[in-house]
Image (spheres, rainbow, N blue to C red):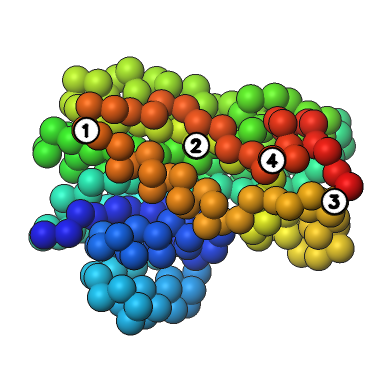
Amino acid sequence: MNKIVFITGATSGFGEACALRFAEAGYDIIINGRRADRLKALEKDIEKRFFVRVLPLPFDVSKRDAVFNAINGITGDWRNIDVLINNAGLALGRDFFDEADLDEWDTMMDTNVKGLLYVSRAVLPLMISQNKGHVINLGSVAAKEVYEKGNVYCASKFAVDALSKSMRIDLLRHNIKVTAIHPGAAETEFSLVRFKGDAAKANAVYRGFKPLTAKDVADVIFYCTTVPEHVCINDLVICPSQQADAIYFHKK
């Protein structure tokens, strides 16, 4: 029987790349996202290319009842989840703290923090029943340093960092690994969402250096899940070679 990976935010970016990478390796895939049409298209693509099973679960990770209803409704051997990738997340706006949009703050905290909490809390009983599993939490270099106009996005990713450390400690007794992955600049829909569809502003973020791709990050995530059973990579920061951290770049 194939191993099973559950990926949130699978309709684009790191999540979609992870779905393809794990499917290529023979995993059966549970994919989550809010956009049901994109989930359906990804399901068809994976099944056609890799001949593995795909279970689409369209729900918003920030809606607690929707999360628990969907995950509690998983039946059969789909409940034998080996890897959970908490990828769903976003950044909205680049504003000074005193000028920021409160609705954007709420959306970031609800998705990046509460969404991770709800999905993890719903999936973990399934892993605990098997006495094994691996949780991957997508953080950011913004979890390591605060930068100007980063305020609540940074705060949400600092929370992911702290929660990953807490989960690692609390889940030791269940033989469940926890890894936090903190990507630097990666060319996905991230900046386009952050700048509300302004392609010029989004593209400018990556000008002067070669950013990470979604596949780069997916390859690292996959590696972390395939180390020997007695090994756990707790925390990993991955940046383009021309980026040192959340602040320092060398752009040409």
Q: Which residue is mark 2?
A: 181
Q: Which residue is mark 3?
A: 208
Q: Are marks 2 and 3 in contact (CB under 8 Å)?
A: no
Task: Classify mark 2: residues with Cα within 10 Å, few (<14), some (14-19) or many (20+).
Answer: many
Task: Provide residue 179's location: percent of width, then percent of height.
Answer: 40, 32
- Marks 1 and 2, the one that precedes in the sequence: 2
Which numbered disc covers residue 229? Answer: 1
Is 98 placed left or right of 107 in the picture? right
Quarter assignment of residue 199: bottom right
The residue mark sitting in front, 1 or 4, is: 4
Is 200 placed left or right of 215 in the picture? right
Which numbered disc covers residue 249? Answer: none
- The answer to whether residue 94 of the structure is visible from this angle is yes
- Marks 4 and 3, the one that precedes in the sequence: 3
- Marks 1 and 4, the one that precedes in the sequence: 1
Q: Amino acid at mark 1?
A: Glu
Quarter assignment of residue 150: top right
Task: Classify mark 3: residues with Cα within 10 Å, few (<14), some (14-19) or many (20+).
Answer: few
Residue at 50% x, 31% y is 236
Task: Provide residue 184's location: percent of width, then percent of height.
Answer: 65, 40
Q: Amino acid at mark 3?
A: Gly
Identify whether 248 is placed above or below 50.
above
71 and 198: which is toward the camera: 198
- Distance in Å between CA atoms under marks 4 and 3: 12 Å
Q: Which residue is mark 4?
A: 241
Residue at 36% x, 73% y is 46
- Distance in Å between CA atoms under marks 2 and 3: 25 Å
